[in-house]
Image (tube, rainbow, N blue to C red):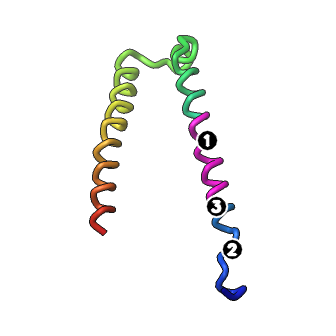
Amino acid sequence: MSEAERPTNVRHRVIGVTTLAAVMLYLDRVCIAEIAKLDEFKASLGLTEGARQFCDTSVLEHGGNRVPQRSFRQKVSRQR
């Protein structure tokens, strides 16, 4: 393999940066979820019970759609 054909190390950097971003997003989500449990936080935003139910429903809907999407992606990738 000549020098021009050898893969570069850019792919390792891309994987590293992507992994770091995923970890940071996970930590952010965990921190926000813990803060959202506090009554002071809910009161400071002025959320009513209806707004809280809407937020809870949105989270459940988003999570409920992730499983079918993943299943569909796996089925499509097997067909290729």
Q: Earlier in the sequence, mark 3 or mark 2?
A: 2
- CA distance for labels 2 and 1: 25 Å
Q: Position of residue 52 (x, y in %)?
A: 40, 21
- Disc on res. 14: 3
Please, what is the three-letter code of the amino acid marked with disc 2?
A: Thr
Q: Position of residue 16 (x, y in %)?
A: 66, 54
Above-or-below relation of 73 to 54: below
In the rendered image, the residue lying farthest to the right is 3
Q: Position of residue 6 (x, y in %)?
A: 67, 80
Above-or-below relation of 57 to 62: above
Q: Position of residue 5 (x, y in %)?
A: 65, 85
Which element carries disc 3, helix, strand or loop?
A: helix
Give the label, 2 or 1, closer to the camera: 2
**Residue labelled with disc 1:** 23
Residue at image coords 56%, 17%: 41
Please, what is the three-letter code of the amino acid marked with disc 1?
A: Val
- CA distance for labels 3 and 1: 14 Å
**Residue labelled with disc 2:** 8
Q: Which residues are magenta?
A: 15-27
- CA distance for labels 3 and 2: 11 Å
